[in-house]
Amino acid sequence: MMEHKMAEPKTGVPRNQAMKAMTLASLGLLAILVLARVTGILPIASDMSPIGAIAFCTAMSLAILGSFGWYLRRTDEHDLHANLWSMVWAWISGALITIDWSILHIAKAAPRPDAMAILLVSTAVAAVIWLWLRFR
């Protein structure tokens, strides 16, 4: 089987450094958010004004979408394959859990669906699929 070497991007971070850059940027952002929360600069959601919450959510969403777009353009086919399939399975599992949990709640067999629990389970599914596809 012939191997193809992927072309390096003309500018910016080389493909093999994209994961390292994303990891460091994510850890840096996490440290900044934790520090801002501990020092009281960033209020908890219940203390935010509606405009402040909208601005925070918009800024975080744009930063996450932009960083993932940057990362996916700079990763190789193997990593891209693992990322895209893990996200597909995360979405499918999230959708199924939401539907099933809602039906069980209506039937009074389960408590009200918890969005954070659904997100965490679908994220765990994505992590397992990504690890399996990436390192098999």
Image (cartoon, rainbow, N blue to C red):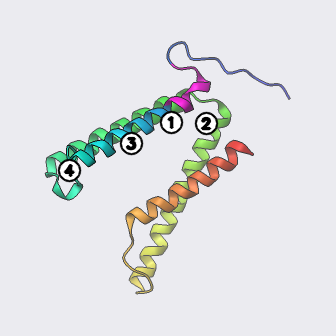
Question: For residue 83, which quarter of the picture?
Answer: top right
**Magenta-drawn stretch contains 29:** no
Identify the mark at residue 30; answer none if there is no mark: 3
Circle 4: element type: loop
Between residue 72 and residue 49, name the one nearer to us.
49
Q: Amino acid at mark 4?
A: Pro
The percent coordinates of residue 41 (x first, y second) are: 20, 43
* Cα distance between the residues tagged 1 and 3: 10 Å
The residue type indicated by label 2 comes to: Leu
Sequence-first tag of 2 and 1: 1
Of the numbered discs in the image, which one, if any, rests on residue 80?
Answer: 2
Occupied quadrant, residue 19: top right
Q: Is residue 92 left or right of residue 4?
A: left
Q: CA distance from mark 4 to mark 2?
A: 36 Å
User: Foreground: 126 or 45?
Assistant: 45
Q: Which residues are magenta?
A: 13-21
Residue 14 within the segment the image draws in magenta:
yes
Q: Which mark is residue 43?
A: 4
